[in-house]
Image (cartoon, grey):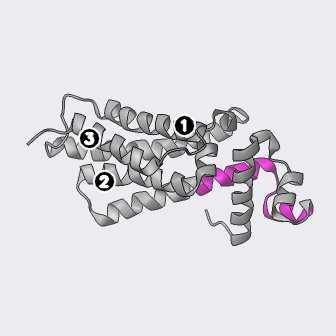
Amino acid sequence: MEITARQMDIIEAAIKIIAQGGYEKLTTKNLAAQLQFTEAALYRHFPSKHELVKMVLCHFENISCEVLVRIRNEQLNPLDSIRRFVLNRYELFSENPDLAKVMFSEEFFKNDLSFAEQYKSIMHIHREEVIGYIKAAQKTGNINQAYTPNHIFQIILGSMRLLISQWNMSNNAFDIIKEGSTLMETIINMIEVKQ
């Protein structure tokens, strides 16, 4: 979905408001104040708060799909594809800590089941892609075939989610890229077939 420059400004302001004050603080009044224009001007770009939040999720989906396309185009080996996907998440959130707070917020998704469904759809895209990398690495003998691809995916993404949650709760007190890279290498060391 195409997002205009003005819509992107609104989306970024919405992410900041949600990250700093929670979903309930996302009001047209607060958004207009953040952007320094009228509430009426907001409605020209988004007819409702619901549509705005859907576009926040679309923005995250667009970012995610872009990295998946880049990984495919680079024709990396399966283990490097897994690394690249995971490290991209850490880099993305390191550059956009407010986005990390929003995307890993339970509060955000309990307000509207359609948001949860949209987020699950994004996670499904991630899951299918990463499981594809895992299966390819198992086929080439790089990842132990004793482990089910879904369990490996859950270990990789579950540990990422925990680390990002800890980073969010610590107010970004540690280097998420460094910690994430070390964690990813630990997981790969556990699942990789030693040659």
Q: Nearer the viewer, residue 30 or 113?
A: 30
The magenta segment = 40-59
- Above or below residue 50? Residue 1 is below
Q: CA distance from mark 1 to mark 2?
A: 24 Å
Left or right: 99 in relation to 166: right
Question: In what element is the residue under mark 3?
Answer: helix
How many marks overall? 3
Magenta region's main secondary structure? helix
Residue at 54% in and 58% down: 95
Image quadrant assignment for residue 32: bottom right
The reply to whether callout 3 and callout 1 are in contact (CB within 8 Å) is no
**What kind of residue is marked 3?**
Ile
Q: Nearer the viewer, residue 4 or 23?
A: 23
Q: CA distance from mark 2 to mark 3?
A: 12 Å
Residue at 35% in and 40% down: 183
How dense is the environment of label 2, judged by Cα within 10 Å: few (below 14), some, or many (20 and up)?
Answer: many
**What kind of residue is marked 2?**
Ser
Q: Which mark, by number, is residue 81?
A: 2
Left or right: 171 in relation to 142: right
Q: Which mark, by number, is residue 188?
A: 3
How dense is the environment of label 3, judged by Cα within 10 Å: few (below 14), some, or many (20 and up)?
Answer: some
Residue at the far front in the pictured view: 173
Question: In what element is the residue under mark 2?
Answer: helix
Look at mark 1 in the image and give the residue it sits on.
Answer: 165
The verdict on residue 32 being magenta is no
Q: Position of residue 55 (x, y in %)?
A: 67, 55
**What kind of residue is marked 1?**
Ser
Q: Say whether disc 3 or disc 1 marks the residue closer to the N-terminus.
A: 1
Image quadrant assignment for residue 128: top left
Of tags 2 and 3, the one toward the viewer is: 3
